[in-house]
Image: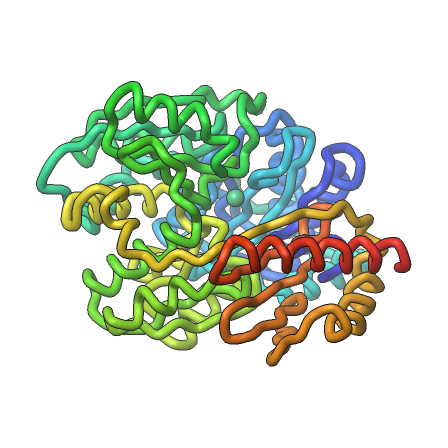
């Protein structure tokens, strides 16, 4: 991780670490790095969005780069607009699922993929050097505004088609997805009931879609006898799903189902996922001709592997899905359209989910100050063998130890001061036992770090 950029761009509390000055510096550095061309910029619904966006725009224009400001826009709309306008890069002003006092800056490549850590380090070097390109008065970049929503919806409708109409409850979490996702679902011919769709920057529910944060969505699906519930995080690069019986569908199950659907739709091929994904995916997609490749956590790693291997689908167990036939930007809105197409072709999710093998996945978050993370991980690596009897260790991202019937991943969050534990086992009892041991190990490591 770099000095300013974490695993998903810059993400900090507004006016603490993320100041207008820092945003200006990012704009100037990106403009210097690009040395001409055009950048698309959009923001999510956070109250600090205009402050940060204006500063980034100002920096870009000062270097002679042209800017297309698409205003409030979910991340996937910005990714789409980069390609639509033939831009050289994109910027999203978003803190994704973080609380409302946070904001962030994430930079995207011309092909819709996020900037790689290497590219971010180059930007940081320019920021620290202060050697920004300075355009003379008559070569300053031009600023124009655009709204690509209609093009996005029309293009998506060419990819995804329904034979029947469904009732969809859509919970945008007061995020930027609210200005696109319900409209796409309606244009597909569905009856849409919107929840938390006022894009105010004041969030009614926790932004991370999970069983707890989506309890209102689950109740509404049940009460309205809807066919499905769909939810997004703050910038709608992610999707959470509630089935036709009003139950939150575990991420691992949804990842298996959609991977299977993509294999049916596009034929056999590679499915790219991350080191925190469980065994179910492999077991579910194998009979459908799918081969699973695991990579580092984060959408940029998934996008890179998709581009490298020509995979047919990429997804993280966080509900971040990349559909390469559409774009290399993670897209929770297009994902929602695909989920409806899957229901249309294969049947209700409550039925489909029964075919996905179930193992027990447990996750835990342990508070850990950022400055202690590296030392704590060293201690965990050193002590793991004393605590667990494992056969393999993968350290491409965090530490994953595994046996034939269980695995545990220890990984510091790149965006929050926490240590994550993810584990999977064949039985509830075994999973709980492993989690107890894992928590003790992590707490001990943090206290000694
Ligand atoms: Mg997000």
Front in this rendered view, residue 141 or 353 = 353
Name the residue located 67 percent from the left edge and 60 percent from the top edge: 411
Q: How is the image coloured?
A: rainbow
291, above or below 41, in the image: below
- Report x, y in % for residue 273: 45, 64
Side of 41 where 57 appears, left or right: right
Query: Is residue 374 at least partly visible in the picture?
Result: yes
Name the residue located 48 percent from the left edge and 69 percent from the top edge: 304
Side of 160 where 448 appears, left or right: right
- Report x, y in % for residue 138: 60, 46
- Report x, y in % for residue 403: 56, 74
Where the C terminus falls, by quadrant? bottom right
User: Which residue is outermost to the front?
Assistant: 429
Q: Image quarter for residue 164?
A: top left
Name the residue located 16 percent from the left edge and 50 percent from the top edge: 346
Where the N terminus falls, by quadrant? bottom right
Mark count: 0
User: Which residue is outermost to the left?
Assistant: 163
Front in this rendered view, residue 392 or 270 = 392
Name the residue located 31 percent from the left edge and 26 percent from the top edge: 221
127, above or below 163, in the image: below
Front in this rendered view, residue 441 or 23 = 441
Side of 279 where 8 appears, left or right: right
Front in this rendered view, residue 342 or 384 = 384
User: Which residue is outermost to the right?
Assistant: 448
Query: Is residue 70 at least partly visible in the picture?
Result: no
- Report x, y in % for residue 414: 68, 54
């Amino acid at each position: 991780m770099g000095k300013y950029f974490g695993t998903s761009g810059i993400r900090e509390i507004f006016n603490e670490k993320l100041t207008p000055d820092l945003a200006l510096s990012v704009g100037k550095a990106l403009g210097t790095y690009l040395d001409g061309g055009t950048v698309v910029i959009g923001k999510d619904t956070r109250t600090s969005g205009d402050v940060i966006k204006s500063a980034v725009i100002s920096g870009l224009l000062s270097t002679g780069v042209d800017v297309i400001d698409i205003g409030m826009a979910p991340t996937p709309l910005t990714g789409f607009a980069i390609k639509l306008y033939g831009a050289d890069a994109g910027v999203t002003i978003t803190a994704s699922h973080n609380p409302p006092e946070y904001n962030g800056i994430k930079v995207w490549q011309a092909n819709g993929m996020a900037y790689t850590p290497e590219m971010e380090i180059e930007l940081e070097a320019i920021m620290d050097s202060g050697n920004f390109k300075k355009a003379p008065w008559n070569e300053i970049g031009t600023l124009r505004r655009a709204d690509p929503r209609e093009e996005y919806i029309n293009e998506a409708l060419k990819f995804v088609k329904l034979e029947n109409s469904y009732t969809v409850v859509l919970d945008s979490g007061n995020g930027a997805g609210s200005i696109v996702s319900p409209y796409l679902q309606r244009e597909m011919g569905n009856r849409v009931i919107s929840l938390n769709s006022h894009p105010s920057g004041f969030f009614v529910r926790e932004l991370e879609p999970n069983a707890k944060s989506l309890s209102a969505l689950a109740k509404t699906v049940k009460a309205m006898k809807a066919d499905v519930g769909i939810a997004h995080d703050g910038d709608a690069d992610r999707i959470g799903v509630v089935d036709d019986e009003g139950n939150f569908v575990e991420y691992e199950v949804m990842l298996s189902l959609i991977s299977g659907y993509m294999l049916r739709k596009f034929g056999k091929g590679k499915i790219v996922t991350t080191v925190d994904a469980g065994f179910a995916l492999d077991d579910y997609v194998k009979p459908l001709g799918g081969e699973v490749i695991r990579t580092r956590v984060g959408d940029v790693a998934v996008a890179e592997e998709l581009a490298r291997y020509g995979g047919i689908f990429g997804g993280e167990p966080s509900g971040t899905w990349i559909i390469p036939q559409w774009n290399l930007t993670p897209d929770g809105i297009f994902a929602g359209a695909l989920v409806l197409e899957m229901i249309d072709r294969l049947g209700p999710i409550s039925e489909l989910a029964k075919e996905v093998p179930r193992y027990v996945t447990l996750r835990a978050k342990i508070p850990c100050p950022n400055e202690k993370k590296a030392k704590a991980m060293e201690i965990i690596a050193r002590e793991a063998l004393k605590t667990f009897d494992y056969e393999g260790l993968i350290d491409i991202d965090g530490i994953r130890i595994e046996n034939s019937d269980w695995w545990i991943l220890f990984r510091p969050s790149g965006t929050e001061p926490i240590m994550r534990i993810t584990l999977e086992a064949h039985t509830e009892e075994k999973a709980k036992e492993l989690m107890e041991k894992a928590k003790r190990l992590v707490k001990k490591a943090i206290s000694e770090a």
